[in-house]
Amino acid sequence: MAKPRRVLGLIVNPVAGLGGRVGLKGSDGAEIQRRARELGALPEALNRTAQALRPLERLKDRCVVVTYPREMGEDVARACGLEPVVVGSIEPGRTTAEDTRRAAQDLSRFPVDLILFAGGDGTARDVYTAIGGSVPVLGIPAGVKIQSAVYAIHPASAGELAALYLEGKATVLRDAEVLDLDEAAYRQGIVSPRLYGYLRIPFERGLVQNRKAPSPLSERGACESIAWAVIDRMQAGWLYIVGPGTTTQPVLANLGLPKTLIGVDVVCDRQLLAADANEARLLELIENRSAMIVITPIGGQGYLFGRGNQQLSPAVIRAVGKSNILVVSTVDKIHSLQGRPLLVDTGDLDLDRLLAGYIQVITGRGERIVYRVAGGDPPFPPVWGGDPR
């Protein structure tokens, strides 16, 4: 007797991540989306959804995909060779958070075995508001701020875990936190995540990310030591692109310079060249210049690139070069990973694989450790060539 076909729901927030590379720290709201487009931002959610759908190709004849019209799932599903069942309606090019909530409700009533959704913390919050923990879900990371624990570590990991769950090979479900920030406060450097609730997700260690963990105040002395280790090695004429975080903040503070806590700043010869720089500004500054990126992993998650620092885009990273990436971290932050590798999710799979391997991490003045970076997901090429605008 043939096994019954499984049903996968798919929701795409097509504007998720729009504000990342242009330095807007989020994509919530029509005004921010308008500003992002004026700055040249392009949608990334559809390509990241395509990466997630590739591992599901092996279930093509055993799984029904149910989704919303056009850019909310239909287009990318068809581009990946799937024939989805399309429900609901949208106004193309003008999707809103209400569309996401309505899609989640419609799919949950279909019913579906699992809902796969692409977005960031705001999207997770909308899904939770609509259906709570009534249906298992899993997030495809596509947003700017992804502190919630409902997301896979990488789009391809989301597809792989979804496939394992639908095949009955991943059987553990766990409650995962839905966290979100006040974006207006976040842009002012105030980082205060709020817990909205829990969603049920399939769980496999190594495929699902942890929630972001704040740096404890006790690390202040270690961060000072790290800052002087960075300053000691600064060379005349070089640009130092300093990423966000409390671990990197003392680097500029000890130079007598202001640091954008959640932004990217550029220093040369102990002078501030650019504060809160976006991708375009960074590419302009580093053209034909020697540069180094100073970056710290996100506490509890271990991401170096791809979470909250999308200004450090693949183009910027390639222009600087892998050998000129300086990773700094307190020992406690590394220990909090419990042996899990550091992660990269730049949106460029070839670059992710290039960045993978073992690296030196500065943990203090004269102190180094060697730690592994994972980023070698299968090289699924982009299949989406459209723009939902």
Image: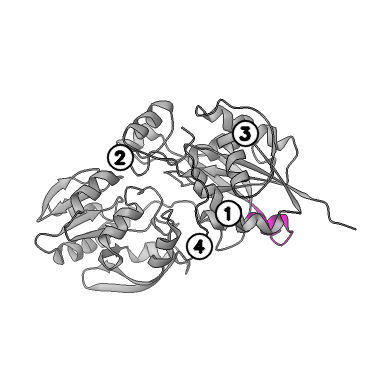
- Measured from the top left, where is residue 190 in percent x and y? 33, 39
Residue at (67% x, 32% y) in the render: 105
Q: Earlier in the sequence, mark 4 or mark 2?
A: 2
| Label 3, label 1: how far apart the Cα atoms are | 21 Å
Q: Amino acid at mark 1?
A: Ala
Q: Is residue 146 left or right of residue 223?
A: right
Q: Which residues make up the magenta segment?
A: 162-174
Residue flagged by tag 3: what amino acid is it? Pro
Residue at the image point whose x is 19% and y is 54% from the top: 287
Q: Which residue is mark 1?
A: 158
Q: x%, y% of residue 206?
A: 55, 63
Mark earlier in primary sequence (3, 1): 3
User: Pointers 4 and 2 in contact (CB under 8 A)?
Assistant: no
Which residue: 16% across, 58% down?
289
- Whichever of callouts 2 and 3 sits on the residue coming sooner in the sequence is 3
Q: Which residue is mark 3?
A: 69
Q: Which residue is mark 2?
A: 189
Q: Which residue is mark 4?
A: 379
Q: CA distance from mark 1 to mark 2?
A: 30 Å
Secondary structure state at the residue bearing disc 1: helix
Q: Which mark is residue 27?
A: none
Residue situated in front as seen by the camera: 296 or 62: 62
* Classed neighbour count for the residue bearing mark 1: other residues with Cα under 10 Å, few (<14), some (14–19), many (≥20): many
Mark 4–mark 2 Cα distance, whole angstroms, equals 36 Å
207 up-or-down from 386: above or below: below
Going from the N terminus, do you reach mark 1 or mark 2 first? 1
Report helix, strand or loop for mark 4.
Answer: loop
Residue at 38%, 26% (x, y): give it.
Answer: 31
